[in-house]
Every structure is written in structure tokens, then in C-alpha cells.
Amino acid sequence: MDERGLRLEGVCAGYTARRGHPERRVLDGLDATAPSGALTALIGPNGAGKSTLLRTMAGLQPVLAGRVRIDGVAVESVPAAELARRLAVVLTERDLPALLTARELAGLGRHPHTGFTGRLSAADGEIVTWALEAVHAGHLADRPVTELSDGERQRALVARALVQEPSAILLDEPTAFLDVTSRVALMGLLRRLARDRDLTVVVSTHDLELALRVADRIWLLAPGGVLHAGTPEELTAQGMIGATFDGDELSFDHASGVFVLQAGSGGSVRVTADDVHRPLLERALAREGWRPSPVRGADAGEPSAPVEAVGEPSVRSGPVEAAGDGDSPPPAGPELAVRQAGDGYLAAFDGDVMRFAAISELAAWSRRAADALREAPPALLPATPLAVSGAVADVSTVSGYFALDIGPIVAGWRPLADLFTDPGVLETRIGETAARLKTTETRVAASILFQGIAARFWSPLLGAAIAHGLLVDLDPGRVHWQAVTGGPLPLRATDLDGWRVRDPARIAERLHRTVVSGLLEPLAAAFQRVVKIAPGLLWGNAASALGGSVRTLARVRPELTEAAVALGRELLALGPLRDTGELAEPEPGHPFFVRRSCCLYYRLPGGGKCGDCALTDPDTRHAQWARAVRETQGAR
Ligand SMILES: Nc1ncnc2c1ncn2[C@@H]1O[C@H](COP(=O)(O)OP(=O)(O)OP(=O)(O)O)[C@@H](O)[C@H]1O
């Protein structure tokens, strides 16, 4: 068995009886090993007994019971001079002799080897030089120690310990007075020395997060005098860190390895970023009370195939009433999603997606989101990109109008917003539609084009909402289209945000906001700038496009009919769609829209009156419906 290292065997540490003071046992029955070649961090709350244990191990106070062994030999049996060659101790010393230089301070460590005179030989001098270089303090050699910074002085003290050429070094809170960089540097230095020189290094510290990151082993002194020993990961996984340090204000987050402020916990956040930015984001957000979601790497580790996502629980996969009857629990998941995007960050919270250039701006905004969360739970939870693209891929199979491509945006794809903001683009599209439909009436071509585009907006969003309970954000800045002649307008996005709805009653309102307020209103305004066309006609077309989407979904996925009709009706009662027409269901499971206006299709060469047109007489309409029902039933 490898005996190297420091070993506690049933150690009882504390203070012997003195006049008027009984013996005080602080720690009892400790068994643990600090192996050589490794950095062991001794952590524990104030008063747990870290200093007492270190001093006991160093032989500075007697072991009350049990045994401390260094490289297999009991410390108490080693003569003091011999022990000084085996073991070096670095205590928190701030008051050092004023006239001593760093080199002279380090040289003091040579005493156990120099004998009576204390004079350093040339060989001793070389060891001192080596030790100062090893702690990156060679340039400080001739400076008085009282003029050194805390970090520089601490390195000189470590050099003094190294000069002893011990097999073990014990350090009591060496990082206590250091700035962050010096703390990290000193812990890194100690680990390097442990490994390079095969030293046993035990360091007590209050820098828990640093210790858990840097140390090879942890000795955790828990209240009650219990010592838990293991790797940082073992102790974290066993819940020991949280059990010891969690308090009213602070709790240890296993996943991120950081302590999170309890007070005003904001909720949970899903962070998707590279290995450098993710910990930074999680830490900055943790300061604002956001717990990292245990489900990691929403994008990174997920397979690209959307199969799993299709099976995600849906709030609206059955009839609307069923979704709201409390049988299915409201969707759970992080309330906030943050992802690295280009040279900034996107943050999604309760239906809004914000872009930030700097983590500090994102953190400040997340504080307000945390405040809002404390007021009321958000109606919308950010869905994972996998869930969104999975839902979109699934409903894309319903028909060409339902398709929404996820892929790279290359030449030829333009943002949807171009349709609203660039009159030239819209004029060209209307001109092409007129040519294809062989009409000289721009107004007629514009009407047909508007209805087609509206159908492209409604269909995928309606499908994802009904089939997957997911609201897809069709952001006109991020979703792109491509100019093709005829057929449904091709739509593509590289990534899409989407939302799960806590309360199914809010789906219609949110879809209305995305499609009508976000897309159709600016589109209608753009059309009206280019062509003289009545708004009532355009909104009739928008409603007709919605009716067509409901009808197609019902035909292709009959199991979704009831939910589709209910949602369609809710939408038709909102904003400019109100009074545009109604969704009839002459036979259960067969919805048809009847509009109160006409789309002008009849004016096209070869065109006629549409089934949903206000101008179609009721008998003809019913005959068309009956034929459509028969055809659908035949197809099913
Ligand atoms: N000389 C002493 N005589 C008696 N009891 C002492 C003596 N020194 C410390 N103690 C007690 O021993 C216990 C452990 O103290 P110790 O200083 O070892 O804890 P620590 O973990 O190093 O604390 P901190 O993190 O605050 O430095 C405390 O209850 C303390 O009051």
C-alpha cells in the first residue's frame, strides 16, 4: 500500500485542558488521506475546525486521540527537526520582520537543513533561487517583504516552505487577503507544485468555488465535526456541499458549481452557448437569482432529427376542452432561455425575445424578468429549439402551405420584413402574380397574392399550436422567403424560437399577436401603399386563409379537427378578423369558412366564385360542401 501522503487515523483534535478550561474536543474520529502529488482543499464553515486540524497535523498542537501519519510515520514520533524537513507550514502571517528581503525570508526555510550556524551554503542558495523562481518571485528576491503586495508576500512564504524541501506543505487560508487573480494563480501554483514535485499539499480555504474547481481532493469539515473526503465531483454529487453550505441566502447549484443567491430566486434558465460563454452567462444570471436548468445544452447535444420532439406533451393535441380540463399538467420547464447568437445573446422570456450585445446588459434585464416572475408566473415558457424545429418539421408534412424550412440562409433568401418595408419588392411580386394569372388588374393580383401569403403565415403556426401546443415565433427579421413563381411562398429560418403555453386559453391571443399584429397588419399596410385596395377585402382574405388552414388541417389530420375549429373560431373573433365571416361545420369534422366579402377571384380569366365567397348562392355552396365531404370521406 502506498504510504506516501498525509493520513488521519481516528484523529481527535482540539485543545488540552488548561487552568480553568477543560479539554475542548473540536473534531473527533477523523479518518482521511491527503495523497502525495495532489492538492487537497480543506473547506468548511467558520469555526468548523480547519485551523485546529491543520495545526494538529503540523504538530503545532497535540493530537488528543488517534494518529496523524506523514508518509506512513506518526507525526508525534518524529523529532521536531526531522519533522521540519518533512513538513512545511504556511500560516497567515502578515507581520514579518521589516528588514527581511524576500530572498532572506525564503532562506529561513533552509534552517532545518543548515545545522547550528544557520549559514546558507552555495547549494542552499541555489535551492532558494529555485524556490523563488518556482513561485514566480525571482524578480522580488531583493525587495523587503514588508513592501510586497499580499499576493507577492504569499508567494514568498510558499517559497520558504519549498526551500524546506518537505514532502508535505500545509497552508492555512493562504488566499485570504488576495485579489481574485492572485487567488486563482496561487491555487494553480499549489496544484502544479503538488504534481511536479510529488508533494502532499493541504490548503484550507473559504474559496469554495475555486477549491471545487482546482483541488484534486476535498476534505469537507461539516458542522458537528464530521469530515467528508472525496473528489470535488463525488462530494458535489453526494449533495455534501449543498448540505453543508446551503443557507437562507445561498444555495449550491450542482450543475454549474456555483453558489446561487436564494433571496429572490428568479426561476430557472436554459443557457445555450459555447464552453467559454456558458459558465459566464450562468454565473451572471445566477447573481440575479436564475438557476441553471438541469436540462443542459438545449441545442448543442440534441440530435438534429426531430422525432423526440414530436412526441412532446401537447397542451392542445386533443379537443380544446380536454386541454383545459386539468387532466394534463401545465408544461414545465425553464422560464428563461438564453443563447449565444453571433456576437451577442438572445434572451427569451414570456413571449419576448431580446438581443443583447453584452452579458452585463442581459443580466440587468434578467433582474427585471426575475421581478416579473415573482409577481406572476409567465404565460409562455421558451420551448427548446429542438421542440420548435420538431413541431415545424412535423406539420410541414400536412401540405405545402404548412411547410417551414429550417436551414441556412444563403443567397436568394430575403427577410420577410422586406415584403413590408421595400415597396419595390412587393410591386415586383404583384406584377409577377398578375402575369401568372393573366390579368391586367393589379388589384386582383394583389388580392390573390395577399391571401396566399396569409395562408403561409397561418398554416405552420396553426399546425404547430394545435398538434404540439407550441407557438412558433415567425419573426419577420429572422424568417426568410424566396422569390419563386407560383405555388406556396417558400419560407426558411435558421433557427426559430417558440413557446409553450401555460394556459391554453392564451393560445389564440398569442397567435393573433404573432400573425395579425406582427405580420399581416404590416403586410396589409404595405399592400395598400402599392395598390388601391380596400382593407375589408384584405382582412376577408386573411380570414379566408385562416379558414383554409383549418380546413386543410382537419382534412389531413382528422383527429385535430375539433381543436382546429375551436382555435379558428377564437381567432376569427379577434381584431380585424372580427365580422369577416364564420367557420361553419355543416357536417361534424368538416369545417368550411364562409366569408362576408369577395376576393375578386371571379375576375380572373377562367376564375369563378369561390366556395367560401359571399357572392356564392347558398344552394351552390351546399352542393359544393356535400361534394367536398364525400371526397374527403372517400380519401379517408
Ligand atoms: N485556543 C483555543 N482554545 C479553545 N478553543 C479554541 C481555540 N482556538 C479555537 N478554538 C475553537 O475551536 C473551534 C474551531 O476553530 P478553528 O479556528 O479551528 O475553526 P476554523 O474552521 O479554522 O474557522 P474559521 O473558518 O473561522 O477560520 C472554534 O469553536 C473555536 O472557538
Image: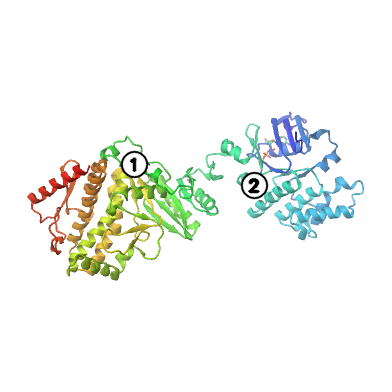
| The residue positioned farthest toward the right in the image shown | 117
Q: Secondary structure at mark 2?
A: helix
Q: What residue is disc 1 on?
A: 314
Callout 1: few (<14), some (14-19), or many (20+) C-alpha neighbours within 10 Å? many
Quadrant of the image where one finds ligand 1: top right
Q: Give the left or right position of residue 468, taking residue 439 as reference.
A: right
Measured from the top left, where is residue 530 in percent x and y?
Answer: 23, 69
- In which quarter of the view is residue 354 placed? bottom left
Measured from the top left, where is residue 292 in percent x and y?
Answer: 49, 46
- In which quarter of the view is residue 353 placed? bottom left
Q: Is residue 122 above or below residue 294?
A: below
Measured from the top left, where is residue 433 in percent x and y?
Answer: 23, 65
Q: What residue is disc 2 on?
A: 214
Q: CA distance from mark 2 to mark 1?
A: 44 Å
Circles 2 and 1, Cβ within 8 Å, touching? The answer is no
Quarter occupied by the C terminus:
top left
Callout 2: few (<14), some (14-19), or many (20+) C-alpha neighbours within 10 Å? some
Label 1 is placed on what type of residue?
Ser
* Front position in the image: 406 or 26: 406
Q: Is the shortest distance between ligand 1 and the CB of mark 1 under 8 Å?
A: no
* Front position in the image: 219 or 408: 408
